[in-house]
Image (spheres, rainbow, N blue to C red):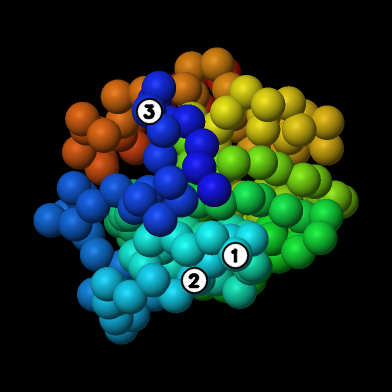
Amino acid sequence: MYFYYTKKCFFMHEIEPYYNWEKYYRADEDARSPFYGCQYSNMYENTIYGYYIHPYWDYIGSETLYLKLLYANYEVRVAIIELFGEWNDTLHNDVMYLKRQVVDKLTYQGINQFILLGENILNFHGSDDCYYEEWFEDVEDGWIAAVNFREFVEREFSKYHLDYYINYGGTLQIDNWRTMKPLQFYENVKQQIMRRLT
């Protein structure tokens, strides 16, 4: 299986999580992270629909949705999460795995601002919005931002009214995020969210 990414054809196993922020943060070395102590090898074991994916993506219980916690800062209360695969709430209730295995553990540590990077989400299949509503209520004075999701995925988000809970689209298409340091990227996203709220 392959798809087109920035005008170039990539096979599933070639797409790896962004790693240039590891000098600032590593989830496997953070005792407050859900992925603390994870060990990674170069063995290809995890698959999506029978196609191997890069071994550095983290398994959260879903058959189709993987992720990497790229950055967490407990002082400013933000987590930046890169997503990969197919987000399928219809068949696999992927939001439940995301919420229970990752988000709940981070909100327990005080995180209330979530940035989801979605350029590697190949498809979205929605269902009910219960977990999204719960997530939105959990962050209280914080927010959830979906950055760089594909237009057809955002259309599906809107079809299931996820715009009630998640900010996406428009100025949250930030193509140059990889050129920024994590806190710089966070401030950029926060600025866009604050503009929307005011």
The crowding category of the residue bearing disc 2, from other C-alpha atoms within 10 Å (few below 14, some 14 to 19, many at least 20), is many
37 lies left or right of 145: left
Disc 1 marks a residue whose amino acid type is Gly
61 lies left or right of 38: right
Q: Which residue is mark 3?
A: 8
The answer, for residue 159, to whether it is visible in the render is yes
Residue 50's tag is 1
The answer, for residue 114, to whether it is visible in the render is no
Q: Which residue in the rendered view is the most extreme toward the right?
A: 128
Q: Nearer the viewer, residue 24 or 2?
A: 2
Disc 2 marks a residue whose amino acid type is Asn
Q: Is residue 128 above or below residue 117?
A: below
- For marks 1 and 3, give the CA distance: 22 Å
Quarter of the view holding residue 28: bottom left
Where in the figure is residue 88, as x and y percent of width and height? 72, 53
Q: Which residue is mark 2?
A: 46
